[in-house]
Image: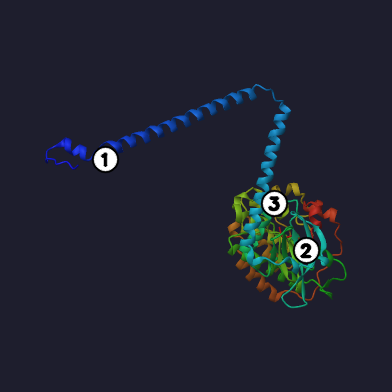
Amino acid sequence: MLLECQNNDKLCFIRENQAEVIVIPALLVGVFVILLSVILWLYCRNWKIKQQNILESKEKAAVPVSENERGQGKASTSEDTSIQLGEMTMDCLLRTAALTLKELEIPRERISQESLEFIQNGSFGGIYRAQLDTPSPGKTQLVVLKMLQESATSHEMKDFLERIKFHQFLGPHENIVKLLGCSVTQTPLYMILEDASNGNLLNFLWTCRRDVVTMDGLPFDLTERQVYKIGQQIASALEFLQQKKLFHGDVAARNVVIGRDFTAKLCKLGLAHRSHTCGPSTVTRTVPLKWQAPERLLKKAPSIKSDIWSFGILLYEMITLGAPPFPEVPPSDIVQHLNRRHIMNRPSSCQPAMYSIMKDCWCWTPTDRLPPTELIWRIQRAIETSNDQAVLQVPELVVPELYANVAGIDLRDLAIDYTVF
């Protein structure tokens, strides 16, 4: 029965819309009460669980635990953590290296494992000679492998990989030992370098004191002109390092290797790598005192000017066929000797033109020394008038133990035949 309502009859309006006005609010209130009850029940349940946990922890704390058991628990936990972190770090290093050194990667199968010949132990592991397959079918190349020992830590692996990256940054130069590539996709990691078949320059100079010297199977005589040519090549390497805003830090005959066709190559670039990575002021490694410039002896940061001083010592080594510098001065007295502004006298086998270059390398003030570019120019001029007929001769043979004592060098360093870092 329909109601007939007046426009101002409010009671009639409520009766007509009683479902919307009464039923719906009642349903909403019911839903709210149910939700509130669920929330309160969950809260009470969680509170009871927390109370039980607190009670159980107090009961466990009341049980005595021996210090030995406690220590073992901590040790095992820390050991497991360090192992996991170490493995994770090394795996991450290898993955990163595989990407950043992709251009240098040489497939492991190109290295003939049967041809491996042990040379010596290096700072990272064994150093070997081996045959490397070239792109030309059937042809191989003799190379040197520096291997990272498989027991190396993640820190040693990082250092090894950083040195490969440093060579990548340095780029090729004909008078610096060349990095041919690497193999870092599997262990052991390899650094693959060109082979310097005639060993280091110091041993070569000592060999020249004997009657017969061969170079690549042919008789060879060392003359004044040959000394200049070696000097020109090392000066070119120093100029290259200067362009890269680097220095060598230990220029000496023992750190130069002789390759085929009598090509001299500067090696042992560890100080250059350290300077490039951390800055010159962090270079603190001790090198033999008699090759160091005065400012190095006074603990100042090395520079290319310090290398120029050492280059003058290198010329002295070559013209005397490997004599130790300052032979009359004990290594412990070299600082006082140089402080008095003393330099070495001209050797009997050294002509005035070469001694003049030496003296210009030994200026006390670094800025007064020859820059590499001018040094190369001076040597080129001297080559034109140098003697290429008279063979350099020194009758006395070298006794390594006596040499090491006079030069202030560890005898073990003289046994190093090939090194890059």
Foreground label between 2 and 3? 3
The type of residue carrying mark 1 is Glu
Nearer to us in this view, 135 or 160: 135
In the rendered picture of this protein, how many numbered marks are placed on residues?
A: 3
Residue indicated by mark 2: 200
The residue positioned 40% from the left and 33% from the top of the image is 34
Residue 77 left/right relative to 403: left
Q: Secondary structure at mark 3?
A: helix
- Quarter-of-image position of residue 384: bottom right
The quadrant in which the N terminus is found is: top left
Percent across and percent down for residue 259 are: 75, 69
Residues marked 2 and 1 touching at CB (< 8 Å): no
Residue, x 36% and y 34% (percent of image)? 30
Above or below, comparing residue 146 to residue 37 in the picture: below
**Residue 379 in view (yes/no):** yes
| Lower position in the chain sequence, tag 1 or tag 3 | 1
Identify which residue is drawn at 23% across, 40% down: 17
Give the image quarter of residue 381.
Answer: bottom right
- Residue 268 or residue 58, whichever sits in front: 58
- The image quadrant where one finds the C terminus is bottom right
- Position of 316 relative to 92 (above/below): below
Question: Considering the numbered disc 2 on the image, is that residue within a helix, a strand or a loop?
Answer: loop
Q: Amino acid at mark 2?
A: Asn
Q: Which numbered disc, 2 or 3, marks the residue that appears first in the sequence?
A: 3
Q: CA distance from mark 2 to mark 1?
A: 103 Å
Would you say the residues marked 1 and 3 are in contact, meaning their CB atoms lie under 8 Å apart?
A: no
In the image, is residue 122 above or below residue 221?
Answer: above
Q: Amino acid at mark 3?
A: Glu
**Residue placed under numbered mark 3 in the picture:** 156
Q: Position of residue 152 (x, y in %)?
A: 73, 51
Question: Which label sits on residue 20?
Answer: 1
Q: Residues within 10 Å of mark 1 (few under 14, many from 20)?
A: few
